[in-house]
Image: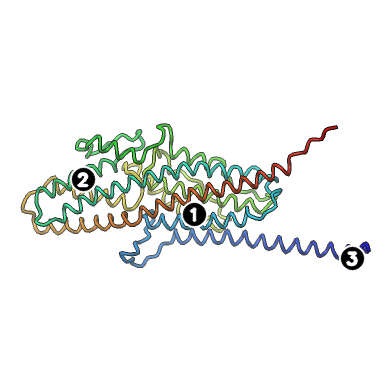
């Protein structure tokens, strides 16, 4: 029996209510996604102040522990983004403007991020080599009795370490500074090759600039709520890559301090803008001093290394008691940094590789959805 007019009207009302429920559920999911991102960024911005134990190193901004937490947060955000935006959604959604442009742009950023992940992996290899050099100095200066041979061995390792750390990447990676004359050219060349394995024309800063060049905040009248999470995820992706390049040795980083402000209406804008401003401020100081990255452990190694080389240059036996205590304190601190690097760098490198594989997999899944869109929207030719 065909439905009466009243039955048809009732079914239409039910359909509208069901669609409204689905819409409200989707809006709630998208709002929750933004809130979760804001919470994770806030945790990274407002670090705990209590003292950490040796087994739980402090999450100082731009420390190894902080970057491990940052990558954990990104991987969680990426999984939630895919669940909220991509999976189980009608493919025709992505054929509508502006998603038909924004999704491919986001996937293009992911491709560029893969290159940065490769560069960061090589940079961590260089950091591991620095850690080994610093450990040689620590082992040598902890030997008793304290002799001239120990000091010479420590100085040689520290000279090589400092020569590598003070690479001025604004001048095509040529070395400069106090320690240039004492370096072993072949050793430094090998150290450089661990980090700078890309073509000479490749630039980490230009890669970041390319990722952010067409990243614009959604306008007020965008036709779909999915525009905001796509903008959010692209912004987080660019930020994570930018922060890693700033901290870990990478090829050619001139002008990296530039960054885009997130509009204040987004709940995650405050912590992200705060993090960007702090890192950019540190980078401006770094560019003036020629340090090779903002990683907390690297900067501390450099400072301690310079102090210990100064001690080695003026070494006379026997060492004054007060000076011996000062050196011993610095050696203990350097040993602590070496342990943190040894314990944290390999897991960090594994996270970078996991991030690489996750982006490859997610990009493939998104391309499958876009392929469905193309099949749906491509007109079928008819032969008459």
Q: Residue at x 51, y 62 (%)?
A: 39
Where's residue 346, x and y in %?
36, 53
Circle 2 Cα neighbour tier, 10 Å, few/some/many (<14 / 14–19 / ≥20)? many
Q: Nearer the viewer, residue 1 or 75?
A: 1
Q: Quick one: quadrant of the N terminus?
A: bottom right
- Residue 322: x %, y % from top left: 11, 58
Contact between labelled residues 2 and 1, with CB atoms less than 8 Å apart? no
Looking at the rendered image, the disc whose residue lies closer to the viewer, 1 or 2, is 2
Which quadrant would residue 342 be assigned to in this image? bottom left
Q: Position of residue 47 (x, y in %)?
A: 41, 62
Determine whether, in the image, residue 47 is placed left or right of residue 15.
left
What residue does disc 1 label? 272
| Label 2 element class | helix
Quadrant for residue 146, please give it: bottom left
In space, the residues marked 1 and 2 are separated at their CA atoms by 39 Å
Q: Residue at x 61, y 60 (%)?
A: 31
- State the separation of the CA atoms marked 3 and 1: 53 Å
The kind of secondary structure element at disc 3 is: helix
**Structure colour scheme:** rainbow
Q: Quadrant of the C terminus?
A: top right
Q: Earlier in the sequence, mark 3 or mark 2?
A: 3
Residue occupied by mark 3 = 7
Q: Give the residue at the far front of this rendering.
A: 383
- Residue that badge 2 annotates: 157
Q: Nearer the viewer, mark 3 or mark 1?
A: 3
Q: Earlier in the sequence, mark 1 or mark 2?
A: 2
Q: Is residue 12 left or right of residue 252?
A: right
């Amino acid at each position: 029996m065909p439905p009466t007019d009243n039955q048809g009207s009732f079914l239409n009302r039910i359909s509208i209510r069901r669609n409204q429920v689905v819409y409200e559920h989707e809006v709630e999911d998208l709002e929750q996604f933004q809130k979760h991102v804001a919470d994770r960024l806030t945790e990274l911005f407002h670090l705990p102040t209590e003292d950490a134990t040796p087994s739980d190193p402090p999450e100082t901004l731009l420390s190894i522990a902080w970057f491990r937490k940052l990558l954990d947060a990104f991987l969680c955000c990426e999984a939630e983004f895919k669940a909220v935006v991509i999976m189980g959604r009608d493919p025709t959604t992505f054929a509508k403007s502006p998603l038909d442009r924004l999704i491919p742009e986001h996937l293009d950023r992911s491709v560029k991020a893969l290159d940065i992940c490769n560069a960061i992996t090589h940079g961590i290899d260089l950091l591991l080599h620095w850690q080994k050099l610093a450990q040689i100095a620590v082992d040598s200066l902890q030997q008793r009795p304290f002799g001239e041979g120990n000091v010479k061995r420590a100085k040689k390792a520290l000279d090589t370490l400092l020569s590598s750390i003070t690479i001025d990447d604004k001048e095509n990676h040529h070395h400069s500074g106090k320690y240039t004359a004492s370096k072993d050219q072949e050793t430094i060349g090998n150290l450089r090759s661990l980090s700078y394995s890309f073509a000479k024309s490749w630039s980490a800063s230009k890669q970041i600039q390319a990722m952010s060049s067409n990243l614009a905040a959604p306008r007020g009248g965008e036709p779909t709520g999915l525009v905001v999470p796509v903008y959010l995820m692209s912004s987080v992706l660019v930020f994570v890559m930018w922060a890693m390049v700033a901290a870990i040795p990478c090829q050619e980083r001139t002008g990296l301090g530039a960054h885009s402000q997130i509009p204040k209406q987004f709940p995650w804008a405050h912590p992200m803008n705060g993090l960007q401003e702090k890192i950019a401020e540190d980078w401006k100081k770094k560019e003036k001093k020629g340090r090779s990255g903002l990683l907390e452990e690297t900067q501390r190694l450099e400072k301690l290394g310079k102090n210990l080389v100064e001690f080695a240059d003026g070494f006379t036996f026997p060492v004054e008691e007060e000076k011996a205590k000062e050196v011993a304190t610095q050696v203990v601190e350097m040993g602590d940094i070496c342990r943190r690097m040894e314990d944290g760098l390999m897991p960090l490198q594994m996270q970078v590789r996991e991030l690489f594989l996750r982006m490859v997999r997610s990009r493939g899944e998104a391309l499958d959805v876009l392929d469905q869109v193309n099949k749906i929207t491509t007109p079928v030719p008819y032969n008459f």
